[in-house]
Image (spheres, rainbow, N blue to C red):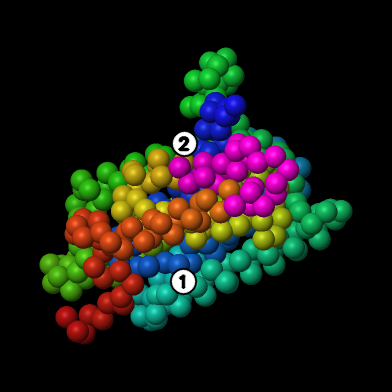
Amino acid sequence: MFDLISFIPRAVVQGIPLLFGSTGETLTEKSGNLNLGIPGIMYVGAISGVIGAFFYEQSGAASPFLTVAIPLCSSLLGSLLMGLIYCFLTVTLRANQNVSGLALTTFGVGIGNFFGGSLIKLSGADVPSIALSATSARFHQSLPIASGLGWFGKLFLSYGFLAYTAVIIALVAAYILRHTRVGLHLRAVGESPNTADAAGIDVGRYKYAATCIGSMVAGLGGLYYVMDYASGVWSNNAFGDRGWLAIALVIFTIWRPNVGVLASFLFGGLYILHMYIPSGMNLAVKELYKMLPYVVTIIVLVISSMRNKRENQPPASLGLAYFREER
């Protein structure tokens, strides 16, 4: 029988990296920047946290606070640098956003594999991976009362702190975008930078801020994947295509981070559904079940292209460089 109590927590854990990535990309796209470098940024966020955790564990120190703070700050810093590179290329130099984003993804994956391979050699491991069990235990630690509350504790209280952080960030981002002056200015920049500039809004500053903050949020998705989902084990090219699914999720949620909370869990469930559907020894059928998230993504993209309502459309200046001289 389908075990819903075990399925939902695993779907949530699968969906958290997607939620971080989609929330970060939504903030970025609201400013008019289309950042296709999210997969690379998530990769850099992950390896930056791994580097910080690796050297801290190697030092022999065991402070609970620093065990969490060092990889967390390292991940945020690495993701911030990637966001700054993207902004410098697309906002300052006005380079093509699609090309810059794709280049950033290639660059991020290459950086991650290079430093990941270097750490594997430094650790002297017999397998091509690094295990950061002490750090992972801190990130994966759930609330103490979860085990004593039965199914309720397992469904709602059995996750690490980054899972709750992802949901909080998404809800706060949705509130800021819809109900604050900063959110209004950001949406104005994404819809019509010419009009926003004429109204006295600093277009460049908003684009830089939204993209860099969005990059840091997306980078946390990479850190969560390694430290919580993968139990602190880093291996090159193990991240999959979660970054691209996070970008597709932005369209699915109609650029609303609060909708992204449930949507990411839905996609997380589709990711592991093949493990819960009986297929016997027929491996071909199981492979077809693994295609579900990608089939759903294609359907979502087709349906989104048919939307006619203005509120369901992307920001009007999405992907376009802003030339102030043409105002």
Q: Label 2, on which residue? A: 164
If the image is split into quadrants, where does the C terminus sit? bottom left
Residue in the foreground of this view, choosing between 122 and 66: 122
Using the rendered image of the protein, determine whether residue 276 is visible from the camera's viewpoint: yes
Mark 2 packing: few (<14 Cα in 10 Å), some, or many (20+)? few
Q: Judging from the image, what secondary structure is the residue with disc 2 in?
A: helix
Using the rendered image of the protein, determine whether residue 250 is visible from the camera's viewpoint: no
Q: Residue 207 appears at what percent x and percent y? A: 32, 66
| Above or below: residue 137 compared with residue 22 | above
Let me know if residue 39 is in the magenta part.
Answer: no
Residue in the foreground of this view, choosing between 196 and 270: 270
Would you say the magenta stretch is mainly helix, strand or loop?
helix
Lower sequence index among marks 1 and 2: 1
| Above or below: residue 254 compared with residue 63 | below
Q: Residue 93 appears at what percent x and percent y? A: 38, 81
- Amino acid type of the residue that numbered disc 1 sits on in the rendered structure: Gly
Q: Residue 183 appears at what percent x and percent y? A: 24, 53
Residue 226's disc number: none
Q: Which residue appears at 61% of the width and 57% of the height?
A: 240
If the image is split into quadrants, where does the N terminus sit? top right
Seen as rendered, the residue at the extreme left is 199
| Magenta region, residue range | 266-288
- Amino acid type of the residue that numbered disc 2 sits on in the rendered structure: Tyr
Q: Which residue appears at 38% of the width and 56% of the height?
A: 300
Q: Label 1, on which residue? A: 101
Q: Which residue appears at 41% of the width and 57% of the height?
A: 299
Q: Which residue appears at 21% of the width and 84% of the height?
A: 325
